[in-house]
Amino acid sequence: EPARAWSGRLATVRPTDVLVREPEDPGDHRRFFHRLVTFERHPNVLPQARARAEAGLAEAELLFAHGADGVLTDASWFPYTPEALMERVERIYWDKLVDPYEPLTEIPSRDEVVFEQSTYALGSLIDGTWAHRIGNLGRRGRRSDDLLFSIYADEMGRGDMAKNHITIIHKVLASMDMDLPHIRQEAFLHQGDLPDHLYGFSIHQVCLSLFPDSLYNEILGYNLGIEMFGLGAMRLHEIQKLRRHGLDVSYEEAHLSIDNFSAGHARQSAEIVVAYLDEVLRGSGEEAVQREWRRIWRGYASFAYFVEHALVKRVRAAGAAAEPVAAPADTPADLVI
Ligand SMILES: [Fe+2]
Ligand SMILES: [Fe+2]
């Protein structure tokens, strides 16, 4: 009885030296990013992360209707069968990533190449993040869990620091005289090498990654998008440009190899989706498969959304002309990754 009384009193008392307040508006991308990557020190960032992830996924559904026009992705909607998914990823690989490849005949100046690399760098500095909580306690019930964790382990170099993709990108950036602090350090808030307006891509990814249970499907789809992005013409062009100026190509080369479409991360990512939905089919039936699939494909679209910034801009402009609606705040339409 006294314990209950004490408990009741403690629950109602308002300590004068504790300030409780709502988290600030995450409008400042640098600060929001900092809180996300140090979320144990900023636990009140979680509701904002959740809201941001949900908003990003909802916005990306725009590409269900228009995604076929993507340059490097095709997020247009299709009903799932394992064969239909494999057909789609084959088409993206050949039609969008590989067949358009032609070697560059003109190489931009060193400054332009370095600037372009700086626009990709933040995304590279969080390489693997989308899956970083996939090995959570008790999470080994499905084949897709092991398969996705295996990709994450590769991203981290499987214990070999020299092969850790974050180590590799730091080495590459150092070859361009960019010596960035670790993303979790306060000093990263004030880094002067990476452009401000490109944080949205990384913020979306970290937000998704913080919810490996409730946004599991979305992470599987996002994983497919990002692993296919390591391939084809864009990477080959980057290698050509970096080589010409004597800059480090190891990050690009590592991805062409480890993400390869025959058996590497890109192929594995499609197989993860098939493995997961196969278990859903056996456990819950076809209707559940289509429901779960929709969430997976939203995850893919939410990756494509950032890559296809020009397409998103066009679709928005056409929509705005047809019916004047305000674009959602923080539209990362000018984002390049
Ligand atoms: Fe990687
Ligand atoms: Fe990868």
Image: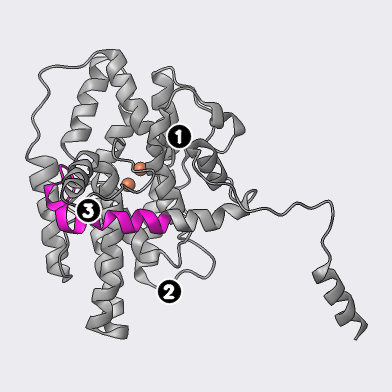
Under circle 1, the secondary element is: helix
Between marks 3 and 1 in the image, the one whose residue lies nearer the viewer: 1
Q: Which mark is residue 263?
A: 3
**Label 2: how many Cα within 10 Å (few below 14, some 14–19, many 20+):** few
Task: In the displayed orientation, state which residue is furthest to the front.
Answer: 324
Q: Residue at x 60, y 50 (%)?
A: 23
Query: Which segment did they paint magenta?
Result: 53-73
Quadrant location of the N terminus in the rendered image: bottom right
Residue 123 rendering spot, x and y as whole percentages: 38, 38
Between marks 3 and 2 in the image, the one whose residue lies nearer the viewer: 2
The amino acid pointed to by label 2 is: Gly
**Label 1: how many Cα within 10 Å (few below 14, some 14–19, many 20+):** some
Q: Residue at x 44, y 53 (%)?
A: 52
Q: Which mark is residue 141?
A: 2
**Label 3: how many Cα within 10 Å (few below 14, some 14–19, many 20+):** few
**Label located before the other in sequence (3 or 1):** 1
Q: Residue at x 30, y 78 (%)?
A: 280
**Label located before the other in sequence (3 or 2):** 2
Residue 92 included in the magenta stretch of the image: no
Under circle 3, the secondary element is: loop
Label 2 with label 1: CB-CB less than 8 Å: no
Under circle 2, the secondary element is: loop
The amino acid pointed to by label 1 is: Thr
Q: Which mark is residue 167?
A: 1
Compute the Cα span from label 3 to label 1: 24 Å
Prevalent SS, magenta region: helix
Residue 20 drawn above or below residue 241: below
Q: Which mark is residue 183?
A: none
The amino acid pointed to by label 3 is: Ala
Residue 300 rendering spot, x and y as whole percentages: 27, 56
